[in-house]
Image (cartoon, rainbow, N blue to C red):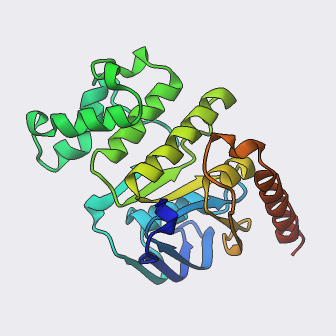
Amino acid sequence: MRPHDAQMDPILRLTNMHRRFPNGVEALRDVSLTLNRGDFVALLGPSGCGKSTLLRLIAGLDQPDAGHLHRAVAPAEIGYVFQDATLLPWADAADNVWLPLRLRGISRAEAAPRVQEALAQVGLSGFAQARPHELSGGMRMRVSVARALVGRPRLLLMDEPFAALDEFTRHGLQDDLLALWRQLGCTVVFVTHSLYEAAFLARRIVLMSARPGRIVHQITSTVPPGADARLSPAYAALVADITHALRGSQAA
């Protein structure tokens, strides 16, 4: 059973949320969204439309000015992958992955099996002692993903994690992310400004308008998950659907 075939339990519900920053910039307006257990949702929209702000609100790193947010997960059950790998340069891969458990008071020895498991999940079993400067950009991002996975999250939030990578590395990490999603059964919210990435990864694409960010369209994917999806007619049709929706949102 694929994660998106699981029972549709709401894991997150946003209702009429607004966010305006102290400098007067209105980042989000009247955003409502429901995520179910096992969803893979892509937040797609132009730069500055509030995608990252929405992700921070979902994570509890920021608070809305109006509206309501209900999470059916505890803060410890949320994993967050930032745009940059944000690794500690003086620490090796294992210690970087251990960091969130360390902050919870879990010793290195107690955390070691989970750290090794997380590194194995992202294909870095042999690089536990490598420091960030010894790793490629793609490998550093894998360490960042492992750090988010080590807490065994039910909700995984990813903020354009592959945007700075070359296309070859990006495709490989996208393939691996889908495999992890199917394996772990967690709910994923993935921020991107690439319609091709959204079409390949997500089961549901949530299209956001330019600032102030609003949800203007949602598209459900019927593309079978897998590396060959990029060559399928269903993928091409979904890319066309997203393109038409983008044009419609710009004309509105």
Residue 5 visible at all: yes
Q: Quadrant of residue 146?
A: top left
Residue 44 place in picture, x, y as percent? 67, 59
Q: Classify residue 107 as left or right of residue 37.
A: left
Q: In the figure, residue 173 lies in which quadrant?
A: top right
Rendered residue at 46%/51% (across/down): 181
218 displayed left or right of 156: right
179 lies above or below 78: above
Residue 189 pos. (x, y %): 51, 59
Residue lying at 66% horizontally and 27% vertically, measured from the top left: 168
The quadrant in which the C terminus is found is bottom right
- The residue sitting at the front extreme is 1
Depicted 96 relative to depicted 193: above or below: above
Give the vertical position of 169 relative to 37 (above or below). above
Measuring 58% from the left and 41% from the top, which residue is drawn there? Answer: 174
For the question of whether residue 164 can be seen, the reply is no
Residue at x 67%, y 74% (from the top left corner): 214
Image coordinates for residue 184, horizontal then vertical, percent: 38, 52
Residue nearest the viewer, comparing 150 with 4: 4
Image quadrant where residue 20 sits:
bottom right
- The total of numbered circles placed on residues is 0
Residue 106 in percent (x, y) is at 12, 44
